Amino acid sequence: MPALAQSTGRVVRGIADMMKAGTLYCGAVEGNPSFTLAGLRVTPTPWDKERNFETLEWFARRAADEGAQAVVTPEGFLEGYVWNDENPQDFSKERYFEIGEYAEGPLLRRVGTLACELHIYLAVGVAERRDERMYNSMIIYSPDGIAVSRYAKTHTAGDEFYNTKGSEFPVVDTALGRWGTVICMDRQLPETSRILAVKGAQLILVPAWGMYGEMNDVMMRTRAFENGVHMLFVHPKRCLIIDPDGTVIAQDKGNGDEVVMASVTLSPSGTRGPIRRRRPEIYGELLLSSLGRDQADSAKDGPS
């Protein structure tokens, strides 16, 4: 209990400090960038990175030819998201690490080159290797071919046992507004999108592979509305582009692989939806109760 009390005190002081510094303030970002956004409702091939890159190139070129300025793939596109293979428990850690790509590796350099050639923002899902760890990542390349954002999935359903979970929620300034990313399971936790919105995101990318359908559609519309942001949900079987009012402005036709596109005008962050009525000064209990529960679970589980 003394350790819990000390940690609780630190959290309370931290919340107070953040309030004074404005860290939790959802401030408006100037500008209303307008552009054409595209999601690739495309199914890649498990374990075949070269074929998947060729598929990416074909659809990215098609989207760019049709006017897309930003193109986004589903989760784990380059390696074919092997966790959804028929028997994921059958592959070894060694095999999974072999399929991983370093951020500065040759295949991802080709992705950057493609973005530069097409002069688009290109966001790609990849099993990313960082030395002796693997991450389920989404990397965004600018029209200059530079990786401007790298996000690692922060939540799983316990089904990606060779991946390390991320712990940060970057928001990147682009020429087309401020963007954030959550991956698949992350979207089911309301805190993830809220953090990005509080940090000024105007557009949240949601590459995914698992659940889709009516419940997910409602969830994505709710996330857009409650945070006052545009959202792009990209799944091999479903794609949605949603405005800050929670309205679906573009979606797939359900007829196999396709490019889903819409013209969007992003709103300044913090200016639409119920997020404008936040009272963060009274939300401390959310963090405190979570801290106590997490510490109790750690004590019960013992050292890892």
Image (cartoon, rainbow, N blue to C red):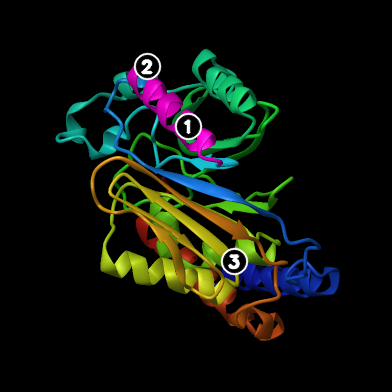
In this view, the residue in front, 83 or 206, is: 206
Quick check: can you spot residue 293?
no
Element class at badge 3: loop
The residue singled out by tag 1 in the image is: 60
In the image, which residues are magenta?
50-67
From the viewer's perspective, is the residue at label 1 or at label 3 nearer?
Answer: 1
Q: Which corner quadrant holds the C terminus?
A: top left
Amino acid at dot 3: Val
Residue name at image x 25 percent, y 24 percent: 92
From the viewer's perspective, is the residue at label 2 or at label 1 nearer?
Answer: 1
Q: Is residue 53 within the magenta segment? A: yes
Magenta segment main secondary structure? helix
Amino acid at dot 1: Ala
Would residue 285 appear left or right of 259 to someone viewing this image?
right
In this view, the residue in front, 14 or 213, is: 213
Q: Position of residue 236 (x, y in %)?
A: 31, 44
The CA distance from mark 3 to mark 2 is 35 Å
The CA distance from mark 1 to mark 3 is 24 Å
Image mark for residue 50: 2
Image mark for residue 229: 3
Amino acid at dot 2: Glu
Q: Is residue 276 above or below residue 57?
A: below
Q: Is residue 278 above or below residue 291?
A: below
Question: Within the image, what quadrant is residue 265 found in?
Answer: bottom right
